[in-house]
Image (tube, rainbow, N blue to C red):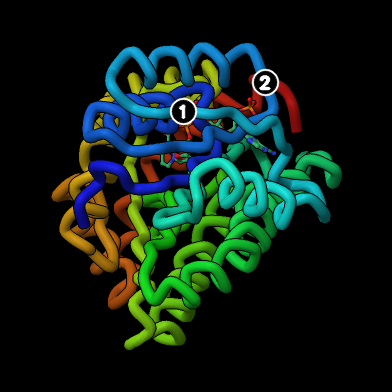
Amino acid sequence: MNLNGARVVLTGAGSGIGRSLALELARRGSFMVLVGRNQERLSSAASEARAAGGRALTFNFDVSQVHGHERLAGFAVENLGGVDILINNAGVSSFQEFARQDPADIDRLIRTNVTGPLLLTRAVLPLMLEQGRGRIVNVGSAFGSIAFAHWAAYSASKFALRGFSEALRRELDGSGVGVTYVAPRATRTPLNSDAVYQLSKKTGMNIDSPETVALAIVKAIETGRDEHAIGGPERFFGKLNALFPGIVNSALRGQNRAARELLQPAGRP
Ligand SMILES: NC(=O)c1ccc[n+]([C@@H]2O[C@H](COP(=O)([O-])OP(=O)(O)OC[C@H]3O[C@@H](n4cnc5c(N)ncnc54)[C@H](OP(=O)(O)O)[C@@H]3O)[C@@H](O)[C@H]2O)c1
């Protein structure tokens, strides 16, 4: 897919991977609607994208809301003339013991990482089907193939997003609309708490830069990939986990212990 002049709706564009993606797409001449809740960050991402050669508008929106996704699709059509690519990138994470996780946080995480992408896809899909072409891009995670202890809600959300991507891809077969699911591994962005970075130091976790991940996502779109997991070891362990989860249970025991030590201060039951 040629990204020069492509009309893109990109969520979570104000920071991290989304911001790097906006810049990467701008360099290729895409026309974008950048979506997020923090207007200041969005506006600065849009200025950066315009300076790099793209056309970028902003749309202040919380994807976890029940309503408004159609309004966002309408804004894109009015201002870009249509939508060729929807990138569901906005997301939140939580690294904590599930038994202590605030129920409201669990609900917010699922609405942001799962319901939001589904509703936004539902809002743009009729346009794409009418055009007879388009691409839905869902930014998942390595945790969508290997569920990690202490990321239970987050892992559940990314498994759901991967399942949605697979089902929709099969449903849209032959329609001209494709579905790409990209699974980054750990990436240095504000998504991760200090505790996550402490854990990564203890366990020697691989961490990518948001620029590297953005480039991988852009390449996956350009080549029309169905699914792309970033990182050789993560790809291998994802497949191993599907076939022999018991082996992965053992391999992750050390990391689980390190996470527990970080999350359960000494002396606490
Ligand atoms: N960083 C990692 O280690 C990692 C690894 C694998 C996958 N990922 C995935 O990569 C994607 C991007 O994350 P990131 O690492 O770049 O984190 P990030 O820097 O925190 O970016 C997330 C973006 O999502 C936006 N967002 C959050 N909740 C939103 C909502 N309800 N409505 C609209 N926008 C919302 C945030 O902007 P506002 O606050 O302005 O709304 C922010 O710009 C996520 O889907 C994440 O799960 C990240």
Give the secondary structure at mark 1. strand
Identify whether 178 is placed above or below 228.
below
Residue, x 56% and y 41% (percent of image)? Answer: 79
Front residue of this view, candidates 110 and 214: 214
Residue, x 45% and y 37% (percent of image)? Answer: 32
Q: Is residue 56 visible?
A: yes
Tell me the crowding category of disc 1: few under 14, some 14 to 19, or many 20 or more residues within 10 angstroms, Cα based.
Answer: many
Q: Which residue is mark 2?
A: 38
210 left or right of 42 in image: left
- Mark identifier at residue 39: none
Q: Is mark 2 within 8 Å of ligand 1?
A: yes
| Residue 255 drawn at (x, y percent) | 39, 39
- Mark identifier at residue 56: 1
Tell me the crowding category of disc 2: few under 14, some 14 to 19, or many 20 or more residues within 10 angstroms, Cα based.
Answer: some
Q: Is residue 199 visible?
A: no
| Residue 60 drawn at (x, y percent) | 69, 30
148 left or right of 250 in image: right
Front residue of this view, candidates 265 and 207: 207
